[in-house]
Amino acid sequence: MAIFEWSSEYAIGEPEIDAQHQEWFRRVQGVFEAIENGGLPEAVEALEFAESYTNSHFRLEELMLRSARFDGLDEHVAQHRGFGEAVKALLLAARSGDAAAPLSAAQMMSKWIVNHIKRSDRSYAEWIALHHGE
């Protein structure tokens, strides 16, 4: 079974966002566990749970970035939208009976999340610290 665990190396220094990222890791790990321990219905349910949390996290993060007047907001939102569309497509496939879709989704999500945090989220955290003295 794949292990998708939070590590302090993913911290960006924004406590609320770091806490959400930790929860995001737990939700995606839940998809891997549902695949390992259950059937397609359990995997779909775990994937729906992870997708729902992803959407909530993106809304909060984008609100924070708008409030900070982050100059890279449009690009950041576009990254979120592209990821959300990819997850939604895999979720729809899983709901339609594609037994491979939950694993594809969990693998894609885990890679994307790590890369996004390490690059894009860390970049905006540095921008906010520079422009808002945090």
Image: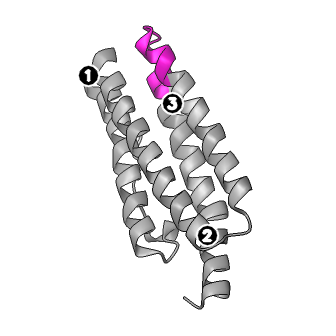
Residue 85's place in the image compared with 59, above or below, is above
Foreground of the two, 66 or 78: 66
Query: Spatial distance from mark 1 to mark 3, Cα to Cα?
Result: 16 Å
Residue 80 lies left or right of residue 61; in this view the side is right
Q: Residue at x 52, y 36 (%)?
A: 107
Residue 130 located within the stretch drawn in magenta: no
Locate the C terminus by quadrant. bottom right
Residue 35 position in % (x across, y down) = 35, 26
The amino acid sitting under disc 3 is: Ala
Q: Residue at x 49, y 18 (%)?
A: 92
Residue 54 position in % (x across, y down) = 45, 45
Report which quarter residue 37 is drawn in: top left
Query: Spatial distance from mark 2 to mark 3, Cα to Cα?
Result: 24 Å
Magenta span covers which residues?
91-103
Confirm whether residue 36 shows in the render.
Answer: yes
Q: Residue at x 59, y 66 (%)?
A: 65
Answer whether labels 1 and 3 touch (C-beta < 8 Å).
no
Q: Quick one: SS at disc 2? A: helix
Q: Which mark is residue 105?
A: 3
Query: Spatial distance from mark 2 to mark 1, Cα to Cα?
Result: 35 Å
| Residue identifier under label 2 | 122
Precedes in sequence: disc 2 or disc 1: 1
